[in-house]
Amino acid sequence: MVAPFVVAEIKRQDKNTTTHSFPQLNSQVICICTLVAVTILIVGLGNPGPQYAATRHNAGIFVVEELLGRATPMPAQLAVHKRTNTEIAELAKGRLLDDDHAVLARTRAFMNVSGGPIKALMDYFSVQPEDLYVVHDELDLELGEVKLRLGGGDHGHNGLKSITKSLGGKPYNKVAVGIGRPPGRMAPADYVLKPFSAKEQVDLAIASADAADAILRAIG
Protein backbone atom coordinates (compact mmCIF):
# COMPACT_ATOMS: atom_id res chain seq x y z
CA MET A 1 0.00 0.00 0.00
CA VAL A 2 1.34 3.46 -0.88
CA ALA A 3 1.68 5.69 2.18
CA PRO A 4 -0.62 8.74 2.07
CA PHE A 5 0.89 12.18 1.72
CA VAL A 6 0.27 14.84 4.35
CA VAL A 7 1.11 18.46 3.64
CA ALA A 8 1.88 20.44 6.79
CA GLU A 9 2.85 24.02 7.42
CA ILE A 10 5.44 24.48 10.15
CA LYS A 11 5.88 27.90 11.75
CA ARG A 12 9.32 29.39 12.33
CA GLN A 13 9.23 28.41 16.00
CA ASP A 14 9.28 24.73 14.94
CA LYS A 15 12.08 25.05 12.43
CA ASN A 16 14.42 22.80 14.42
CA THR A 17 11.88 20.00 14.65
CA THR A 18 12.74 17.01 12.50
CA THR A 19 9.98 14.57 13.44
CA HIS A 20 6.25 15.21 13.23
CA SER A 21 3.66 12.64 14.28
CA PHE A 22 0.04 12.44 13.16
CA PRO A 23 -1.69 10.27 15.80
CA GLN A 24 -5.04 10.58 14.03
CA LEU A 25 -3.65 8.50 11.16
CA ASN A 26 -2.98 4.78 11.78
CA SER A 27 -0.89 4.14 8.68
CA GLN A 28 2.57 5.36 7.89
CA VAL A 29 2.56 8.76 6.19
CA ILE A 30 4.92 10.78 4.10
CA CYS A 31 5.00 14.38 5.33
CA ILE A 32 5.74 17.21 2.95
CA CYS A 33 6.50 20.07 5.33
CA THR A 34 6.62 23.72 4.32
CA LEU A 35 8.42 26.25 6.51
CA VAL A 36 6.15 29.28 6.92
CA ALA A 37 7.88 32.63 7.44
CA VAL A 38 6.36 34.98 9.99
CA THR A 39 6.74 38.73 10.43
CA ILE A 40 8.96 39.94 13.25
CA LEU A 41 8.23 43.48 14.46
CA ILE A 42 11.07 45.40 16.14
CA VAL A 43 10.13 48.81 17.53
CA GLY A 44 12.40 51.41 19.11
CA LEU A 45 10.65 53.61 21.65
CA GLY A 46 11.23 57.35 21.82
CA ASN A 47 9.73 60.76 21.33
CA PRO A 48 9.32 62.37 17.89
CA GLY A 49 11.04 65.56 16.79
CA PRO A 50 14.65 66.73 16.44
CA GLN A 51 14.69 68.17 19.96
CA TYR A 52 14.44 64.64 21.38
CA ALA A 53 16.57 62.77 18.85
CA ALA A 54 19.75 62.56 20.97
CA THR A 55 18.08 62.15 24.37
CA ARG A 56 18.34 59.16 26.70
CA HIS A 57 14.63 58.41 26.34
CA ASN A 58 15.27 57.65 22.64
CA ALA A 59 17.86 54.95 23.31
CA GLY A 60 15.61 52.33 21.72
CA ILE A 61 15.61 54.18 18.40
CA PHE A 62 19.41 53.99 18.25
CA VAL A 63 19.09 50.18 18.25
CA VAL A 64 16.61 50.27 15.37
CA GLU A 65 19.04 52.48 13.45
CA GLU A 66 21.78 49.91 14.11
CA LEU A 67 19.57 47.17 12.66
CA LEU A 68 18.67 49.34 9.65
CA GLY A 69 22.37 49.61 8.92
CA ARG A 70 22.74 45.82 8.95
CA ALA A 71 20.17 45.20 6.22
CA THR A 72 21.53 43.71 3.00
CA PRO A 73 22.37 44.27 0.23
CA MET A 74 22.23 47.89 1.39
CA PRO A 75 21.12 49.73 4.55
CA ALA A 76 17.38 50.30 4.95
CA GLN A 77 15.57 53.54 5.74
CA LEU A 78 12.39 54.30 7.63
CA ALA A 79 9.42 55.73 5.74
CA VAL A 80 6.15 57.13 7.03
CA HIS A 81 3.33 54.60 7.40
CA LYS A 82 0.31 56.88 7.68
CA ARG A 83 -2.19 54.16 8.52
CA THR A 84 -0.47 53.42 11.82
CA ASN A 85 1.15 56.80 12.57
CA THR A 86 4.60 55.20 12.52
CA GLU A 87 7.78 55.11 10.47
CA ILE A 88 8.75 51.66 9.21
CA ALA A 89 11.12 49.69 7.02
CA GLU A 90 9.84 46.41 5.60
CA LEU A 91 12.64 43.88 5.08
CA ALA A 92 11.94 40.77 3.04
CA LYS A 93 13.24 37.41 4.21
CA GLY A 94 17.00 37.34 3.82
CA ARG A 95 17.62 41.09 4.14
CA LEU A 96 17.98 40.97 7.94
CA LEU A 97 16.60 37.61 9.07
CA ASP A 98 17.37 34.33 7.33
CA ASP A 99 13.95 32.73 7.76
CA ASP A 100 11.48 35.55 8.42
CA HIS A 101 10.26 38.91 7.26
CA ALA A 102 11.16 41.87 9.49
CA VAL A 103 9.52 45.22 10.10
CA LEU A 104 11.66 47.82 11.86
CA ALA A 105 9.73 50.75 13.27
CA ARG A 106 9.41 53.77 15.48
CA THR A 107 6.22 55.58 16.39
CA ARG A 108 5.40 59.17 15.47
CA ALA A 109 3.50 59.54 18.73
CA PHE A 110 4.99 60.49 22.08
CA MET A 111 6.41 57.79 24.32
CA ASN A 112 3.50 57.68 26.77
CA VAL A 113 1.00 56.77 24.02
CA SER A 114 3.13 54.23 22.14
CA GLY A 115 0.64 51.41 22.62
CA GLY A 116 -1.94 52.48 20.04
CA PRO A 117 0.42 52.80 17.06
CA ILE A 118 2.28 49.59 17.94
CA LYS A 119 -0.97 47.63 18.26
CA ALA A 120 -2.03 49.08 14.88
CA LEU A 121 1.24 47.86 13.35
CA MET A 122 0.74 44.39 14.81
CA ASP A 123 -2.77 44.21 13.37
CA TYR A 124 -1.67 45.51 9.97
CA PHE A 125 1.18 42.99 9.61
CA SER A 126 -0.52 40.14 11.55
CA VAL A 127 2.21 40.04 14.20
CA GLN A 128 1.77 37.89 17.31
CA PRO A 129 2.89 39.27 20.71
CA GLU A 130 5.72 36.73 20.95
CA ASP A 131 7.10 38.13 17.67
CA LEU A 132 7.15 41.73 18.93
CA TYR A 133 10.44 43.18 20.22
CA VAL A 134 10.20 46.57 21.94
CA VAL A 135 13.52 48.34 22.58
CA HIS A 136 13.47 50.91 25.38
CA ASP A 137 15.67 52.93 27.73
CA GLU A 138 16.13 51.52 31.24
CA LEU A 139 17.06 53.56 34.31
CA ASP A 140 17.78 50.46 36.41
CA LEU A 141 20.62 49.29 34.14
CA GLU A 142 24.01 50.96 33.90
CA LEU A 143 24.82 52.76 30.66
CA GLY A 144 25.87 50.14 28.14
CA GLU A 145 24.08 47.20 29.74
CA VAL A 146 21.45 45.33 27.73
CA LYS A 147 18.77 42.91 28.91
CA LEU A 148 16.17 41.02 26.85
CA ARG A 149 13.18 39.35 28.45
CA LEU A 150 9.78 37.98 27.47
CA GLY A 151 6.98 39.47 29.54
CA GLY A 152 7.58 40.70 33.05
CA GLY A 153 6.81 44.06 34.59
CA ASP A 154 7.08 47.49 33.00
CA HIS A 155 9.47 48.89 35.66
CA GLY A 156 7.56 52.17 35.75
CA HIS A 157 8.27 52.85 32.09
CA ASN A 158 5.29 54.75 30.67
CA GLY A 159 5.93 53.62 27.09
CA LEU A 160 5.88 49.96 28.15
CA LYS A 161 2.78 50.57 30.27
CA SER A 162 0.96 51.93 27.23
CA ILE A 163 1.95 48.94 25.09
CA THR A 164 1.06 46.39 27.77
CA LYS A 165 -2.36 48.00 28.14
CA SER A 166 -2.96 48.03 24.37
CA LEU A 167 -2.04 44.33 24.14
CA GLY A 168 -4.34 43.38 27.00
CA GLY A 169 -1.44 42.23 29.17
CA LYS A 170 -0.16 39.63 26.69
CA PRO A 171 3.60 39.05 27.07
CA TYR A 172 5.94 40.44 24.44
CA ASN A 173 9.72 40.83 24.19
CA LYS A 174 11.26 43.80 25.98
CA VAL A 175 14.81 44.83 25.14
CA ALA A 176 16.19 47.17 27.79
CA VAL A 177 19.12 49.46 27.01
CA GLY A 178 20.68 50.87 30.17
CA ILE A 179 20.99 54.63 30.61
CA GLY A 180 21.85 54.62 34.33
CA ARG A 181 20.32 56.57 37.20
CA PRO A 182 20.21 60.38 37.27
CA PRO A 183 22.99 62.13 39.17
CA GLY A 184 22.36 63.76 42.52
CA ARG A 185 18.77 64.81 43.09
CA MET A 186 17.84 65.23 39.42
CA ALA A 187 14.33 63.95 38.70
CA PRO A 188 14.20 60.88 36.41
CA ALA A 189 11.66 62.65 34.18
CA ASP A 190 14.21 65.42 33.54
CA TYR A 191 17.16 63.04 33.22
CA VAL A 192 15.66 60.93 30.43
CA LEU A 193 15.10 64.06 28.34
CA LYS A 194 18.75 65.12 28.58
CA PRO A 195 21.02 64.39 25.60
CA PHE A 196 23.83 61.86 25.85
CA SER A 197 27.28 63.37 26.37
CA ALA A 198 30.00 62.76 23.77
CA LYS A 199 31.52 60.00 25.93
CA GLU A 200 28.12 58.44 26.58
CA GLN A 201 27.43 58.35 22.84
CA VAL A 202 30.42 56.03 22.42
CA ASP A 203 29.04 53.69 25.09
CA LEU A 204 25.58 53.92 23.54
CA ALA A 205 26.90 52.88 20.12
CA ILE A 206 28.44 49.76 21.67
CA ALA A 207 25.24 49.03 23.60
CA SER A 208 23.15 49.46 20.44
CA ALA A 209 25.27 46.88 18.64
CA ASP A 210 25.01 44.52 21.63
CA ALA A 211 21.22 44.95 21.74
CA ALA A 212 20.94 44.28 18.00
CA ASP A 213 23.02 41.12 18.45
CA ALA A 214 20.79 40.00 21.34
CA ILE A 215 17.62 40.48 19.30
CA LEU A 216 18.96 38.56 16.30
CA ARG A 217 20.13 35.70 18.56
CA ALA A 218 16.74 35.52 20.25
CA ILE A 219 14.93 35.36 16.92
CA GLY A 220 17.35 32.65 15.76
Image: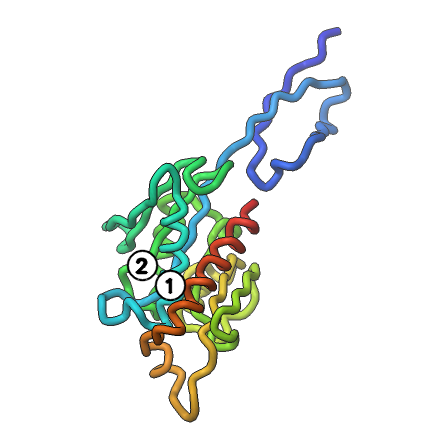
Q: Is residue 143 above or below residue 148?
A: below
**Direction from residue 6 to residue 96 in the image, left or right:** left
Q: Given contact means CB atoms under 8 Å apart, are the residues at marks 1 and 2 in contact? A: yes
Residue at figure coordinates x 39%, y 54% from the top left: 66
Q: Point out the image quarter for the C terminus.
A: top right
Q: How far across and how far down the image is residue 47, in percent?
A: 30, 67
| CA separation in Å, label 1 and label 2 | 7 Å
* Mark 2 lies on residue: 107
**Direction from residue 66 to residue 217 in the image, left or right:** right
Residue furthest top in the image: 1
In front of the other: 7 or 110: 110
* Mark 1 lies on residue: 45
Q: How far across and how far down the image is residue 46, in percent?
A: 34, 66
Q: How far across and how far down the image is residue 88, in percent?
A: 31, 49
In front of the other: 206 or 37: 206
Q: Is residue 24 above or below residue 137?
A: above
| Within-10-Å neighbours for mark 1: few <14, some 14–19, many 20+ | many
* 1 or 2: tag closer to the N-terminus: 1
| Within-10-Å neighbours for mark 2: few <14, some 14–19, many 20+ | many
The amino acid pointed to by label 2 is Thr
User: Tag 2's secondary structure?
Assistant: strand
Q: How far across and how far down the image is residue 32, in percent?
A: 61, 21
Quadrant in the picture for residue 35? top right
**Direction from residue 17 to residue 103 in the image, left or right:** left
User: Tag 1's secondary structure?
Assistant: loop
- Residue 121 is tagged as none
The amino acid pointed to by label 1 is Leu
Residue at figure coordinates x 28%, y 63% from the top left: 109
Residue at figure coordinates x 58%, y 33% from the top left: 10
Q: Is residue 105 above or below residue 20?
A: below
Residue at figure coordinates x 37%, y 49% from the top left: 69
